[in-house]
Amino acid sequence: MKLGLQKLSLVDYPGRVACVLFLPGCNFACPYCHNPELLSLEASADLVSLETALSHLGRRQGVISAAVISGGEPLLRPDIPALVSRLRHHAVLVKLDTNGSFPERIGPAGVDYLALDIKTSPARYPELWPAAPTDAADRIMESIRLVRALGKPYEFRITCAPGIFGLDEARQVAALLRPEDPVYLQRCQKSQVLDPVWAESQADYSETELAGLLSIIRQAAPSARLRGS
């Protein structure tokens, strides 16, 4: 297995010093994707072997206490439980970042922390998901339910991408949330994206507009906040 490795992160696993493993391959094509070089399973990015990543964990044992499996979309791979098991040999907690398109693989992954990206209202997912199945919206809603039901720490993340997540989408997503849900909105960063033409055509949200989106989400999940604020 080849992957991207961020050797140290203080922000990707709450309260932990972590390393991040970026697995190539994604079934989505979000125009604002900030890891476009990882969309293909044969990604040409500067990847390392899994053994190299595990060796890094071994050398930093006692400093790094968590590993984050990100992507791409990690759950494209059926062998995530085996990867989680290998990471645990290094006495780390494991977090999974997922887009929610494989609800049946979320529980078996066996991770300690789950972060689910909610891209937009479920009905609009086929716009971001090439060859989306007919039950795409149902799969996303099932993932939201499962992440909440597993009894593990979790968070829902929403990228405020103009034209993709706006006021209407915020209202529809809010209808899926519960008061206890930890929800983080984040600004859409356009410095390196999959579709530069899209980025140039969309005006950034103002602080007032971001506050309006957050206000809608807080009606359902009062603790929601804008990450970085």
Image (cartoon, helix red, strand yellow):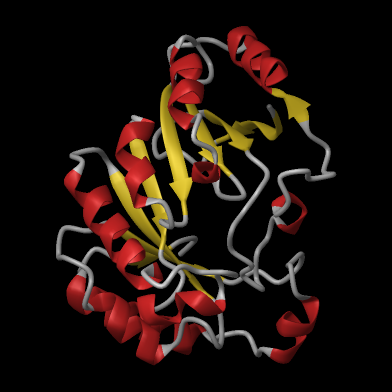
Taking the spot 65% from the left edge, 64% from the top edge, the residue there is 33
- Quarter of the picture containing the N terminus is top right
Taking the spot 49% from the left edge, 35% from the top edge, the residue there is 78
Front residue of 72/40: it is: 40
Q: In the picture provided, is 73 more to the left or to the right than 193?
A: left
Is residue 150 at all visible to an observer of this figure?
A: yes
Depicted 6 relative to depicted 85: above or below? below
Front residue of 209/21: it is: 21
Depicted 112 relative to depicted 202: above or below? above
Front residue of 184/151: it is: 151
Q: In the picture provided, is 162 more to the left or to the right than 124?
A: right
Taking the spot 60% from the left edge, 13% from the top edge, the residue there is 60
Q: Position of residue 108 (x, y in %)?
A: 33, 33
- Quarter of the picture containing the C terminus is bottom left
Q: Position of residue 91 (x, y in %)?
A: 43, 12
Depicted 225 relative to depicted 75: above or below? below
Front residue of 110/139: it is: 139
Which residue is most to the front? 134
Q: Position of residue 148 (x, y in %)?
A: 21, 51
- Quarter of the image for residue 206 reads bottom right
Q: Position of residue 183 (x, y in %)?
A: 32, 61
